[in-house]
Image: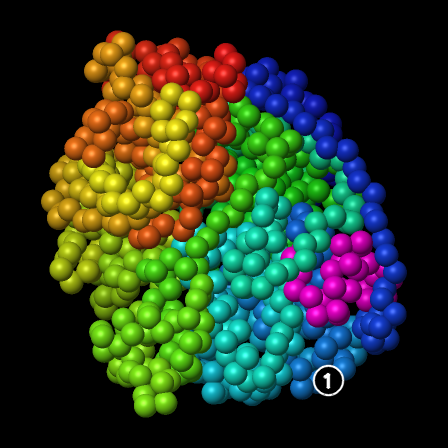
Amino acid sequence: MRHYAPAPTDAVLADLLGEPSLARGVVHHEVIPPRAAEFLELPGWLDSRIADGLAARGIDRLYRHQAEAIEATRAGEDVVVVTPTASGKTLCYSLPILQALAENPAARALCLFPTKALGQDQVAEFVALANAAGLGVSAATYDGDTPAPIRSAIRTAGQIVVTNPDMLHAAILPHHTKWFQLFEQLRVVVIDELHSYRGVFGSHVANVVRRLLRLCEHYGSRPVIVCCSATIANPAELARMLTGRPARVFDRNGAPSGERHVLLVDPPLLDQGTGVRASALTLAQRWALPFLRAGRQTIVFGRSRTSVELLLTGLREALRESFGPRSRVRGYRGGYLPTERRSIERGLREGEVLGVVATNALELGVDIGRLDVAVLAGYPGSVAATWQQFGRAGRRQASSVAVLVGSGAPVDQYVIHHPEFLLGGSPEEARLDPDNLHVLLGHLKAAVFELPFEPGAHFGPGPADDLLAFLAEEGHVRQAGDGRWYWSSENFPASAISLRTAAQENVVIIDTTPDRPQVIGEVDLFAAQTLVHEDAIYLHESAQFHVDRLDWEERKAYVRRVDVNHYTQADRAVTLKPLDVFARETATGGVRAHGEVMVASLATMYKKLKFVTNESLGWGRIHLPEIELQTTAYWLTAEASSSWRRNELDAALVGAGRAIQTVASVLLMVDPRDLGLVSQVRSPHQEAPTIYLYESVPGGVGLAERLYARHDELVAAAEGLIRTCNCDAGCPACTGPRLEPDINAKALARRLLGELGAASLRPA
């Protein structure tokens, strides 16, 4: 195997910035200076064996945030540790757990990680530290891959149980009597990657934690909760919403870091009129290649499994002739076998793997060492995720490089041209709503199944009796003579709840390619209309599947594996009707409001788009029934003006609405698909032109209320997005695709937003 003496990272970057075709795309170049470590001494109460174990691993002091969080945990406080990637958050919970076990071997700990890989990585870390301390600790992963005989041993003897929210929900809490040793002796609960528990998923997990703490109270334990998170604006609020308990925040990072170069790169514009840009994947590859050729360990992040495979293929082909075996550049994504993942992680730590192309599976805290360069092919969707991925590069002393290559998508363009959002502004808020009725009722059923409810007992915001009475009318529960509520159905309630969706009904996706058909996934009804309609190309594990038949009544989609050069994108016809107004207030140039709405959606047609270029290859009709979604929305009604022509007002509403939708997803740290957009010049429900942003999950999770509160900021930021766009008259990056070439959508949208107050907030 040929190895090359690595060239300095700074020198490679200087050469790249000297290349005009690359340098002209750099929108912003920030140099973050190195930071020295802040240390505190080990606490005096720490068991001497643990201190010796730390010393054997080269640790004789703790970073400030580690020491302070551990002291608070010792005092019985719940804590949230909010520091960057590779800042040593693991010790913030592993030391309290090991100390509890050193004091009492019967003690137990439960650790929740959002992915299997991260859980397995942390088990190895626990075992290594315990062995160094000479403590015989039983730590094991309990997930879907755990064999039955080992599951039994973990239930009875596992001191540290590492699992994920899905397994806790479906396999542990409903069978708590088999886990009584865990619940009776539970001392510490760890919730890692706190920022990932937002939206519908976070709302479900908050109810799972409610059920967990209810059972702990039943068994007589009150564990301390340690949460770890990437940087977000509201860690204390998020932790309280997730656990129902106050938590103390530790966000003063004491870990050292070397100098870091952060570059925001925009692909070149190919067509000034349409706003079409060059491929972000191709440009990301061009930025990564020189570092790889110079022998610098580099990670490239793709936003999807398909993009990972395309990037990996391109990099390997480019390196084939000049740089050793293909195995030095590897892929890492969902669908890879655990043994493959462990091999790649080990290769990165030991330096045998020079480059890796990954999805956000490597965004989380899996131990892969410290790399030199991180290249992001597309904005990951949130500031927190961006810094998680940036943080994969950066050794303690040496310089590192992080490159974000934006795509032509509106959110990407906004972030690229507003570097303050990433580098100087506040991070986003993470929102969830555990009291969303669609979510709450399902978990209330599961909670009754696990343990009867006393009269007046709380589950959620207040006493659960009214909700239990409603469930009794449906035959799920019954009230006994002593007033207690019992589960009375033959169904197993947890099995009917998917933590990833709010809807109770999902469409099951069945692969008919093999001899024996098998289920490969499921999607909620609302998404099924656009993802698994007949003749759709469904992407799963980077493979392509053709949807042969969608049995809407049976909620089953039958697919077969194919190899094609395109994917499909469906269009919806959406109408919206307000049902209730929660708050309304006069605003500059109009009225802002938020409330409950009914959204009727009909999938109408789909387009076949070529991979990478998005070239249209044809279209087809979709024949499915209309479905309704009752949710919450924020809306903005402009004052009707006779100075607007109808077609101009249409273009202004659509353009302004798309810009508001774009900045809303940035500000609230949500996927753009979480917020639907409806723009209406006039409807039976509104006489004046109105822009609606509705939450795309039943009942909503609190996003609409936050948008209502940040109205002025939204309008100003939307005007700024359009104003700073390089297009002439509107494009997909600001106002959306131009439907009428003769109309200047950019000027019209800015005029409307100016009337709504943007001009006074952010002058042109």
Where residue 326 sits in the image (x, y, percent)?
54, 45
Residue hosting label 1: 104
Regarding mark 1 in the picture, which secondary structure is present there? Answer: loop
**Which sits in the foreground, 756 or 427?**
756
Identified at 58% across, 48% down, the residue is 234
Q: Which residue lies at the image location 70% right of the left edge and 73% below the top edge?
A: 97
Residue under the point 79% across and 60% down: 67
Q: Quadrant location of residue 191?
A: bottom right
Residue 708, given in percent of the width and then of the height, sits at: 43, 37
What residue range appears in magenta?
54-81
Residue located at (14% from left, 42% from top): 622
Estimate the x, y position of residue 421 in percent, counting from the top left: 57, 32
* Residue 701 in sight: yes
Q: Relative to the observer, which residue lies in front, 48 or 152?
A: 48
Q: Which amino acid does the dot numbered 1 rest on?
A: Asn
User: Is residue 323 shown to the viewer in this render?
Assistant: no
Residue 287 drawn above or below residue 72 = above
**Residue 271 drawn in magenta:** no
